[in-house]
Amino acid sequence: METVYRDYAPKGVQFLYVYKALAHPELNGYVQPFTLQERLMHIREAKRTLGTQIEWICDSMDNQIKHAFGDAPNSEFIIGPDGRIVVRRAWSDPRQLRADLERLVGPVERITRVEDLDLPTAPPPQAAPKGIVPRIRRPANLVPLKQQPIAGEKKLPFYVKLRAEADQALLREGSGTLYVGFHLDPLYHVHWNNKARPIVVRFVTEDDQPDPRVEPNVLKGPEVDEPADIDPREFLVRVDRSQGNRDASLRVKVAYFACNDEQGWCLPVSQEYRVFFEADRDAGRARGGRGSGPARGGPGTRPAPPGFRPPRPALARFRPLSGRLAEVDAEKRRITVQTRDGTKIELQVPDDAMLIRNRRRITIEQLRRGDPVRIRYHEDRGRRLVRGMMVLPLFER
């Protein structure tokens, strides 16, 4: 994208990145910001780490731009001088953008290459070691919930941010599993102080009594031998909304110690959240904890609540399939593969399916009709679900 910008900005083409809610929170440790100021901090961080020279527009906290542009995570638009959309693309593709601009504006004399850019990039910040506390395995198909952060008396930033996700049973039937994860925000360069008491999380009623709907309703983080780390603190609890007001929100109080070595401070923080039993369509899809496996003893493990048995994944028998892509429906995440004998097989591509071209992960929007593919899939309730796909040839010659 930067090479296209270098070539076409002098021709009067204006380039803008639009900051929207994170599509994949936890990528490089970054989490959803709570305030507009934090979104602007994210933009500054993107400029620092990526070295980009393209200007940014910051979406409002109610995500008006995101909704107006169709909620796609990485969409791309070419807008003409009259304000009309000339090209709309669900997934940004710099090569196609260059081809569009060559057609609309004209070719350039010399195409800028990536190696010509010399961008002043920098790694994401890391205040302490990670990989110390094992991640828990979240049940599949959890739905992120809307929440309202409530600052404490000291009005400190939310150095640690909550992510709450519910299973379908909890949302539809009123009783099920709730994931709560507390993630350090790398914008503030803080880490856990493991020499102090661990994080404590309490689910309470309006009069500060333990919430009987949640089991357990008091959670304590792990005791960690390492003096500091930046791993999330994660828990699974059981919630039964049949006790009391079914639609009443959860009140979550959290107390922890945060440290910033650059500024030389460690301090206790007490903050509060309201968690609502309503899906948050702007929360993105977190991938950080999936596939990490359950902790096997040691720091970070949590006993299951009494009587609670987390769902066990079904043993899937993966089947091989080779052929060419006959159809690709990126919006519905469906593909049709035509085998050598002419048989057409329709498959669903889950969000976590691994799609590979030339040893690099790609998205379903980058698939094209006619691509030769090798696929591993399994069947679930009559649907064929893609587990992994290799787009051939393996290497470009």
Image: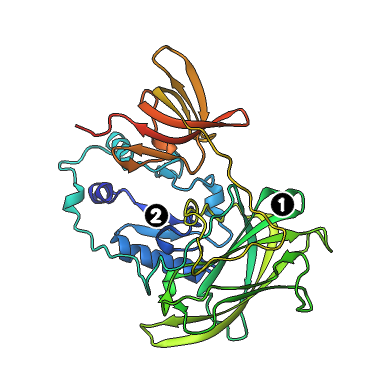
Q: Position of residue 91 (x, y in %)?
A: 42, 41
Q: Position of residue 61 (x, y in %)?
A: 56, 62
**Residue 117 can be seen in this image:** yes
Q: What element carries label 1?
A: helix
Identified at 40% across, 38% down, the residue is: 355
Amino acid type of the residue that numbered disc 1 sits on in the rendered structure = Leu
Identified at 81% across, 59% down, the residue is: 246
Is 67 or 205 nearer to us in this picture?
A: 205
Relative to residue 39, is residue 245 drawn left or right? Answer: right
Identified at 39% across, 23% down, the residue is: 322
Amino acid type of the residue that numbered disc 2 sits on in the rendered structure = Tyr
Q: Where is residue 22 in the image (x, y as percent from the top left)?
A: 48, 56
Identified at 46% across, 60% down, the residue is: 26
Relative to residue 57, is residue 240 drawn left or right? Answer: right
The residue that disc 1 covers is 171
Query: Which of disc 2 and disc 1 is earlier in sequence?
Result: 2
Is 177 or 80 nearer to us in this picture?
A: 177
Q: In this view, does 261 lie above or below 204?
A: below
The residue that disc 2 covers is 17
